[in-house]
């Protein structure tokens, strides 16, 4: 039986087609033979730094060759890689480093400089080595060294660093089930926002990645001739999937860090991209651009994830890329990807999120665990090889989201399913439709944002007595983040003077927005802060009633449509 681990995707492709292009990073073009040799070298280097099986290696970089090598080299050395979104601020990065006790951090000199004030508080924790990919800009010490020097000195035999799996699980429905197995051991931690505050680390196995690559490559019909554009962050499961699906079939990935949508269009043209996966807000921007002649000539498909694609945007994209097949997808980090809508169904049911992807089973359940009838709303529950291992060091949250299926559905089930928290309905033909979320999570720019994480930043300021963050529908972002704040007495100068109170209320939103821009990544910065006259309303459970506030603010905004402002009043 052939054991499949994540690095085997590169190894196998290097054995089949060693001279085929695997990665393009700017002017660098890397073949599969070269990529596998450098992955082995990176694994040796990490082992030489003392990386032990199961220890965590974080990579805080933009999309570049070193990012890919760190992830796959860590996996090959038996560690767990932790890709960190490069747009996160120092405080969010520090939380991730401490939450999973990162032992080795790979980053750039500029990013390290932004982290230094917080890393000084981290001296006594697990972080013992920092590797800087630049060859200048920092002083090399026992704790900090350059990437080039690290790889040059690596000499540990690979037999000492290859991980040994404890057991295998047969992938359901594989073409060659007698010859393929995938390892269930953990290999990565991807951080995703949770509804109760700080991001949680989702623990992902070799099996999740390998079977996920097989599944996605199958329904997208990926092939060795494909050139996939890596537009999404590699810290996203869908972003990292561009690597795994391409490596599975021996295709080429073009790493791209765009500034503007037109940069992506230029890449589509110059790199002859055949496959593009992105989130709806980016597609909305692309659909509004003028596409250069021949831009979509090679594009075979475009796929969307991270929210609903507006029908107008989909129509424009199909006009601009008439030969490209559209794939509408739904997924969550806890289960990689759950559903896709085949291109031939897009015109018949454009609002559907499709049916389960290969190697996955998707159920719609009532609160009591029984199966919903056709068109009856219920919770989307995902089972199968793509369900991840749970949340890092968080058994309570894991038990809440990852649970066995009820015995009356499958009395023989031994693995946990993931309960999404999303409400969907299934029609008589088995196609699913998204209805809404049960929690307070905000979906903006393709990101899941915890309102609590935004509120914690604002509560650090004395002028904020109460605050509530929530999303309001937005044509481009999906949802725009709005915050309603009740000010403290100090914020209004503890005076009954109406003019002084009015001045304080006018100044507070701008002050708080400036602080949010400093302390939060751009996608989490509120679009608007509204001052509420008095204590915020509560629901029957005594919690701040975000839904009522959102409805009231939406009505206020509708009444003042056409006006530009960063704050409103009730």
Image (cartoon, helix red, strand yellow):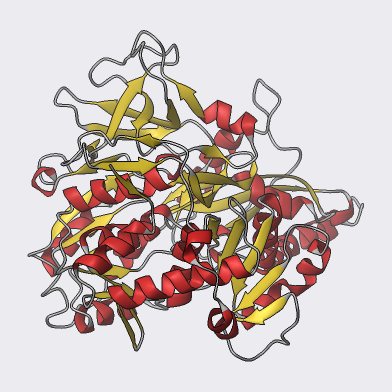
The residue at 7%/65% (across/down) is: 323
Q: Is residue 300 visible?
A: yes
Q: Toward the viewer: 199 or 129?
A: 129
The residue at 53%/51% (across/down) is: 189
The quadrant holding residue 30 is bottom left
* Position in image of residue 404 (x %, y %): 45, 20
The residue at 69%/48% (across/down) is: 455
In the figure, is residue 307 to the left or right of 399?
A: left
Outermost top residue: 408
Q: Is residue 371 above or below residue 546?
A: above
* Position in image of residue 394 (x %, y %): 64, 36
In the figure, is residue 457 to the left or right of 16?
A: right
* Position in image of residue 477 (x %, y %): 42, 57
Q: Is residue 278 visible?
A: no
The residue at 45%/39% (across/down) is: 388
* Position in image of residue 277 (x %, y %): 29, 60
Q: Toward the viewer: 540 or 507?
A: 540
The quadrant holding residue 110 is bottom right
């Amino acid at each position: 039986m052939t054991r499949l681990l994540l690095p085997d995707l590169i190894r196998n492709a290097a054995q089949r087609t060693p001279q085929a292009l695997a990665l393009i990073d700017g002017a660098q073009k890397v073949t599969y033979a070269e990529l596998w040799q450098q992955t082995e070298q990176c694994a040796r280097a990490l082992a030489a730094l003392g990386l032990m099986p199961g220890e965590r290696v974080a990579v805080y970089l933009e999309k570049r060759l070193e990012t890919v090598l760190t992830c796959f080299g860590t996996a090959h050395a038996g560690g767990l890689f932790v890709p960190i979104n490069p747009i996160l601020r120092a405080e969010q990065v520090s939380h991730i480093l401490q939450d999973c006790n990162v032992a080795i951090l790979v980053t750039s000199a500029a990013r390290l400089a932004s982290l230094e004030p917080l890393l000084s508080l981290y001296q006594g924790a697990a972080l013992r080595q920092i590797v800087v990919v630049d060859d200048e800009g920092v002083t090399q010490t026992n704790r900090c060294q350059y990437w080039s020097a690290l790889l040059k000195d690596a000499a540990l035999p690979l037999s000492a660093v290859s991980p040994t799996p404890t057991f295998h699980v047969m992938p359901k429905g594989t073409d060659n089930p007698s010859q393929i197995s995938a390892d269930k051991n953990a290999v990565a931690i991807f951080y995703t926002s949770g509804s109760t505050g700080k991001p949680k680390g989702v623990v992902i196995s070799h099996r999740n990645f390998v079977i996920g690559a097989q599944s996605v490559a199958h329904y997208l019909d990926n092939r060795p001739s494909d050139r996939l554009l890596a537009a999404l962050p590699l810290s996203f499961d869908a972003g990292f999937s561009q690597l795994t699906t391409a490596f599975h079939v021996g295709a080429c990935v073009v790493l791209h860090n765009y500034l503007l949508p037109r940069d992506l269009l230029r890449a589509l043209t110059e790199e002859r991209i055949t496959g593009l996966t992105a989130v709806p807000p980016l597609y909305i921007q692309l659909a509004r651009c003028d596409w250069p002649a021949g831009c979509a000539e090679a594009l075979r498909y475009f796929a969307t994830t991270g929210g609903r694609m507006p029908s107008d945007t989909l129509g424009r994209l199909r006009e601009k890329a008439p030969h490209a097949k559209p794939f509408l997808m739904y997924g969550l980090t806890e289960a990689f990807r759950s559903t896709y809508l085949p291109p031939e169904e897009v015109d018949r049911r454009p609002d559907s999120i499709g049916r389960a992807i290969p190697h996955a089973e998707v159920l719609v359940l009532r609160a009591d665990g029984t199966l919903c009838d056709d068109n009856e709303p219920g919770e989307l529950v995902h089972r199968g090889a793509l369900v991840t291992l749970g949340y890092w060091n968080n058994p309570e949250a894991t038990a809440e989201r990852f649970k066995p299926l009820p015995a009356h559905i499958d009395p023989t089930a031994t693995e946990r399913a993931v309960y999404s928290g999303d409400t969907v309905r299934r029609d008589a033909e088995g196609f699913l439709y998204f209805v809404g979320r049960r929690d307070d999570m905000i979906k903006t720019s393709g990101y899941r944002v915890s309102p609590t994480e935004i509120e914690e930043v604002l509560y650090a300021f004395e002028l904020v007595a109460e605050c509530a963050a929530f999303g309001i529908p937005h044509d481009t972002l999906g949802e725009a983040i709005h915050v309603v704040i009740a000010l403290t007495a100090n914020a209004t100068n503890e005076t009954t003077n109406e003019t002084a109170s009015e001045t304080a209320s006018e100044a507070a939103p701008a002050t708080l927005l400036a602080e949010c821009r400093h302390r939060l990544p751009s996608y989490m910065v509120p679009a608007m802060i509204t001052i509420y006259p008095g204590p915020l309303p509560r629901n029957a459970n005594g919690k701040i009633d975000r839904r009522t506030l959102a409805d009231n603010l939406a009505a206020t905004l509708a009444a003042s449509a056409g006006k530009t402002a960063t704050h409103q009043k009730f």
